[in-house]
Structure formats: C-alpha cells, structure tokens
Image (tube, rainbow, N blue to C red):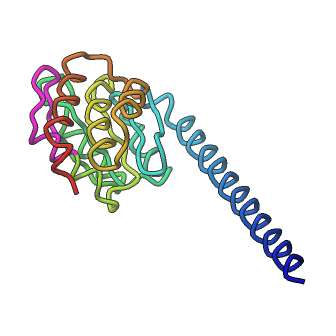
C-alpha cells in the first residue's frame, strides 16, 4: 500500500514538473517571437537593432520615425549615449522622444574617454523598472555594448564572458571601450551587494 502511494505521488510530482517545464518553455518561445516582431518593426529605423529581452533593445542611431514606432511597441524610454559634438541634434531627439510619450535620457559618452560616473548613471537608469522597456543607442552600438556588459555583470550577476559575448552581438568592437568595461567591472565587482 505504501509503495503504491509513493508511486502515485512520484507520478504526480514528475507530471507536474514536466508540465511546468513545458509551460515555461512555451512562454519563453512566445516572448522571443514577440521580441523578434519588435525587431522587425524597428529594423529599418534603428540600425543594429537587437531586442535583448523584455526590458532592453539596443542599436545604433535611430531615425526620426523610430521613436513613434518604439512607443507603439510599448517602450517607455530612450537612452542615448551620444555627445553633442557627434553631429546629432540631441534637442530634436529629445523632442521626438517626448512627443512619442516616452522618457528621454542622455549620457554623453565620448568613445575614447568614457568615465566611471557615466557607468554609474547608466546603471541607475537601466535598473529602474519604471524605464522599461528601454531603447538604448549610440552612433554604432559600441558604447551601448560596453555599458550593457558592465550592467549585466555588476547588477545581474552574469559572468564576464557571457556579458562580453552579448556586448559583441550588440556592437562592441572597440578595444578601448572593452578595456574600460573590463577595468570598471574589476574595480567594482566586490562592491555590489
């Protein structure tokens, strides 16, 4: 009698675990399909567009039309890492983003001289769920890749290798920015709680 009850209980537990695994897998596939649809919607207007997850999409400089499309796809904010001297009208960009009912943030990162306080501000903005989903951009997605690498390791506990792999997909190819990210991570890894 005891063996029969144990077998039934084991069957119920096994079936429940398999069902839960199937449901989670289907939800993840559904999320990826949704992210792929967003990428397709923004593809012509955001070079190098990459929907990382439900919270973040990254890319190079968006067109003027991209902001309304991002808002229509549920984005709440745009974070630009471009500086004024790069030939982009940041005031116009802010206006277009705000006309689309999203929040606009700008951290003017110079590729050859990123600063630690800029990484701190980036982390503060991207970890705030009120800003999600967020479209993060710069001229080529190099800076975005470096700063996302920092965030993934320090705030989300990713391994440096996994974060570097994602950063390369985003657009990180600049060795100076890569070194900045790695040095920043090394200096701050033990300071996070």
Quadrant (top left, top right, bottom left, bottom right) of the C terminus: bottom left
Q: Is residue 34 left or right of residue 87?
A: right
- Region rendered in magenta: 107-122
The one nearer the camera, 120 or 179, is 179
Residue 5 is drawn in which quadrant? bottom right
Image coordinates for residue 161, horizontal then vertical, percent: 38, 29
Q: Is-magenta flag for residue 183?
A: no
Q: Residue at x 54, y 42 (%)?
A: 38
Q: Is residue 106 above or below residue 20?
A: above
Image coordinates for residue 65, horizontal then vertical, percent: 41, 37
Q: Is residue 48 above or below residue 71?
A: above
Q: Is residue 11 above or below residue 79?
A: below
Quadrant (top left, top right, bottom left, bottom right) of the N terminus: bottom right
User: Which residue is outermost to the bottom?
Assistant: 1
Q: Residue at x 80, y 65 (%)?
A: 15
Q: Residue at x 22, y 30 (%)?
A: 181
Q: Is-magenta flag for residue 117?
A: yes
Q: Is residue 120 above or below residue 63?
A: below
Image coordinates for residue 179, horizontal then vertical, percent: 20, 22
Residue 149 is drawn in which quadrant? top left
Image coordinates for residue 192, horizontal then vertical, percent: 20, 52
Q: Is residue 190 left or right of residue 154?
A: left
Q: Residue at x 41, y 33 (%)?
A: 162
């Amino acid at each position: 009698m005891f063996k029969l009850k144990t077998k039934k209980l084991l069957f119920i537990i096994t079936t429940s675990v398999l069902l839960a695994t199937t449901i989670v897998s289907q939800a993840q596939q559904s999320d990826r399909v949704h992210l792929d649809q967003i990428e397709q919607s923004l593809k012509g207007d955001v070079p190098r567009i990459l929907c990382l997850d439900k919270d973040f999409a990254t890319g190079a400089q968006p067109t003027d039309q991209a902001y309304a499309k991002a808002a229509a796809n549920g984005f709440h904010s745009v974070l630009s890492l471009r500086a004024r001297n790069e030939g982009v009208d940041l005031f116009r960009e802010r206006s277009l983003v705000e006309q689309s009912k999203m929040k606009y943030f700008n951290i003017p990162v110079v590729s050859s001289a990123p600063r630690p306080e800029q990484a701190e501000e980036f982390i503060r903005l991207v970890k705030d769920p009120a800003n999600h989903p967020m479209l993060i951009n710069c001229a080529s997605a190099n800076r975005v890749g470096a700063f996302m690498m920092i965030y993934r390791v320090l705030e989300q506990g990713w391994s440096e290798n996994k974060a570097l792999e994602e950063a390369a997909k985003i657009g990180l190819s600049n060795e100076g920015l890569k070194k900045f990210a790695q040095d920043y991570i090394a200096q701050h890894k033990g300071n996070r709680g």
